Amino acid sequence: MFTGIASLHTEAVDEVVKGLLLERWLGLLDQQTGDSLTALQGVFRERAGSLTADEIALGCPLNNLAQEMSPLDERFRRLVDATFEAWRKGFAQALERGQAEGTVRQDVDARKVAAFLVAAAEGSYGLAKSANSRTMLRSNLETLATYLDGLRPAGQRPRIGR
C-alpha cells in the first residue's frame, strides 16, 4: 500500500507541482524586463502582490510534500530535490547573467545566493502558513527583493533617502 501512495505522490510532483512551482517562479522570471537583479526583484514583488488565500492557508505544495514524504522514500526525495534544483539553477543563471552584464558583483557566489533565495522563499511560505499571515509573507518577499540591491556593484546601488 505504501508503494502506491509514494507512486501517487511522485506523479503529483512530476506532473502538477513541479510545473506549477517552476511557472510561478521561473516562468515569471522569463517575463521580467531589465537587468537580472531587477528581473529577480520583479519576481519577488509580483509574487508578493498576487498571493492567494490558499497560498497562505496551504503553503507551498512542494515544500509540504518534501517535509512529509522525503524522509520516507528516496526516489521521491530525489524528485523533489530535482525540482528545487531546477528553481535554484534558474535563479543562479539569472545571477550569472547579471555578472556577465556587469550588474551583479563579481564576488557573488551565484549558486549560494540562489540556494539562499529559494530557501528563504520556502521558509517564508512555511512561516506564513503557520501564522496564517499574508502580511508576513508579503513582507518577507519584499525584503528578499530589497536584499538583491546589495548584490549590485557599488556604483549601481539605489540611493536610500537621507
Image (tube, grey):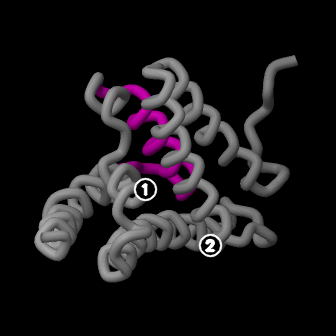
Q: Position of residue 113 (x, y in %)?
A: 66, 62
Whether residue 6 is visible, yes or no, is yes
Label placed on residue 120: none
Q: Is residue 78 above or below residue 105?
A: below
Tell which residue pokes out farthest to the front in this image: 1
Specify the segment rendered in magenta: 30-52
Magenta span dominant secondary structure:
helix
**Residue to which mark 1 is pinned:** 67
Q: Are marks 1 and 2 in contact (CB under 8 Å)?
A: no
Using the rendered view, name the quadrant where residue 149 is placed: top right
In the image, 7: left or right of 29? left
Judged from the image, the secondary structure of the residue bearing numbered disc 2 is helix
Q: Amino acid at mark 2?
A: Arg
In the image, 9: left or right of 30? left
Which class describes the residues within 10 Å of circle 1: few (<14), some (14-19), or many (20+)? few
Cα–Cα gap, marks 1 and 2 = 23 Å
Whether residue 30 is visible, yes or no, is no
**Residue to which mark 2 is pinned:** 111
